[in-house]
Structure formats: C-alpha cells, structure tokens
Image (tube, grey):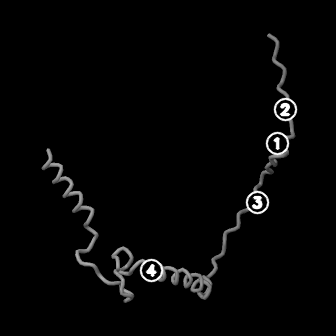
Amino acid sequence: KASRRRRETRIAMEASNDNVSAAPTLCAEGCGFFGNPQTMGMCSKCYKSKVAKEAKAAPAAAAAAPPAEATPMAVCPAPSVAVPSAAAATLTPPPAAPPAAAA
C-alpha cells in the first residue's frame, strides 16, 4: 500500500509541475530578476508595470480612434392599442360580477 501511495503522489507531483520550466529564466524586460512563463516571461514587477501601461494606453487609443460609421436604427411604430398605466390599473376597481341566475 505504501509503494502505491508513493507512486500516486509522484504522479500527482509530476502532473502539477508540467507548466514549470526546468531551468529558471531571467525577466524578459532585462531587469535581472527571474521571469515566469505565466507572466509572459517577466518578473512580477515588470509584468504589473506593463499591464498598467497598457491599461492607460487603451482609453487613450479608444479616444483617438475615429468613430465607427453610424447605422440607421429601425423605428418601432407606436402601439395601436392604448395600454393602461399601472397606477390607473391599481386605482380602478374591477367590474362587478353579474348576479347569479336563480334556478
């Protein structure tokens, strides 16, 4: 049982280490820290800085972009039947029921 448990543990550990590189790599920005494949090869500080710069550039690029060509909207016709408002419906009592026929 112990050898089976060790084998299952080893297999689980190997599966969890699939996305970890064997050798450490330096940050892609050249700062000297170690990079991470999950952060595009950058260290956490350079990655956060890049994300912040991209976030600032995105609104500026959207504002500088020419407006999209407008498309005409279809106009819905007005309803042909008058719809009572909710307030009128709650204030108006329901019609009286006709008296029951005597048998």
Q: Nearer the viewer, mark 2 or mark 4?
A: 4
Mark seen at residue 78: 3
Whole-number angstrom distance, CA of label 2 to CA of label 4: 73 Å
Viewport quadrant of the C terminus: top right
State which tag comes first along the sequence, 2 or 4: 4
Mark seen at residue 45: 4
Rendering coords of residue 48 (x, y %): 47, 78
Q: Residues within 10 Å of mark 4 (few under 14, many from 20)?
A: few
State which tag comes first along the sequence, 4 or 1: 4
Mark 2 is on which residue type? Pro
Front residue of 101 and 28: 28
Kind of element beneath mark 3: loop
93 over 56 or under it: above or below = above
Q: Is residue 71 left or right of residue 81?
A: left
At x 36%, y 73%, the residue is 38
Front residue of 70 and 6: 6
Rendering coords of residue 30 (x, y %): 37, 89
Q: Is residue 75 left or right of residue 45?
A: right
Kind of element beneath mark 1: helix
